[in-house]
Amino acid sequence: MKKSHDDRRIRKTKVIIRKTLTQLLMEKDLKDITVSELTEIADINRGTFYLHYKDLYDLFEQIEKEIMDDFIGIITKYRKLTQVPLMPVLLEAFKYFAANSQIFIAILRTKETTFLNQVIDMCRPQNNKEWQSLFASDKDEYYEYYYSFIAFGCVALLRRWFDNGMTESPEQMAALAEKLMANCTRDLP
């Protein structure tokens, strides 16, 4: 019984640490944040922080990894299907972005992150079948251009949504992304 209580306390402490880092990242760059500042705001001692993390970069990397693992789960679930339906993938992704918006906003404004590049690479079609289902074109030499255009367009769409205070629902954003992607790929050479 004691272990369960300890596990809950550890989880609560980690949540507080992560929320505090997110809050600080909304105000300043990761390199400008100190462990002392974070622990003071989180109302924990430095020893507790170092019990779980080597330093702030370790904490940040663990947060990125957790989010990336969740995102990989979303993409992997749909990759297993023979025909990848675009709308359900986009809807689940936008719902995930909305549910975790504060950390995504913090990550997107952090100069030290490679998170977006990792997501873009991870979502890249992995074989000719995936390329062809995404782009109705037989010009496979252009696939990387098409993908870059759409991937970075989606990133810009996501940033704009966050910047505008996420006034549209995840459903509206997923529908908009699907429409934009469909229009971009409709008349490909």
Image: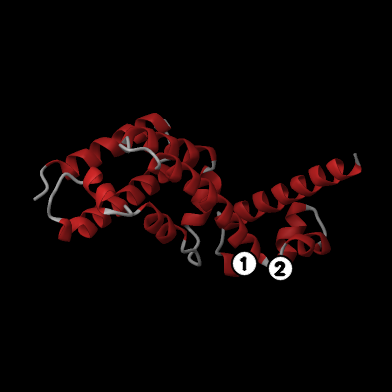
Report whether residue 33 is seen.
Answer: no
Report whether residue 88 is seen.
Answer: yes
> In the rendered view of the protein, which quadrant contains the N terminus?
top right
Q: Residue at x 82, y 60 (%)?
A: 45
The residues bearing labels 1 and 2 have C-alpha atoms spaced at a distance of 8 Å
Q: Residue at x 39, y 49 (%)?
A: 159
For mark 2, give the secondary structure: loop
Mark 1 lies on residue: 57
Q: Callout 1, which amino acid?
A: Tyr
- For this rendering, which residue is in front, 158 or 38? 158
Q: Residue at x 37, y 56 (%)?
A: 120
In the rendered structure, the answer to whether residue 25 lies left or right of residue 146 reads: right
Q: Relative to 30, does residue 83 appear above or below in the rendering?
A: above
In the image, residue 11 lies at what x, y percent? Answer: 75, 46
Q: Residue at x 49, y 39 (%)?
A: 96
For residue 40, what is the image quadrant? bottom right
In the image, residue 28 lies at what x, y percent? Answer: 56, 61
Q: Relative to 177, does residue 17 appear above or below in the rendering?
A: below
Mark 2 lies on residue: 54
Coloration mode: secondary structure
Disc 1 and disc 2 in contact, CB within 8 angstroms: yes
Give the total number of marks visible in the rendering. 2
Q: Residue furthest right?
A: 2
Can you tell which mark lies on residue 110? Answer: none
* Crowd class of label 1 (few under 14; some 14 to 19; many from 20; radius 10 Å): few
Q: Callout 2, which amino acid?
A: Lys
For mark 1, give the secondary structure: helix
In the image, residue 90 lies at what x, y percent? Answer: 37, 38
In the rendered structure, the answer to whether residue 67 lies left or right of residue 169 reads: right
In the image, residue 82 lies at what x, y percent? Answer: 33, 38
* Crowd class of label 2 (few under 14; some 14 to 19; many from 20; radius 10 Å): few
In the rendered structure, the answer to whether residue 185 lies left or right of residue 153 reads: left
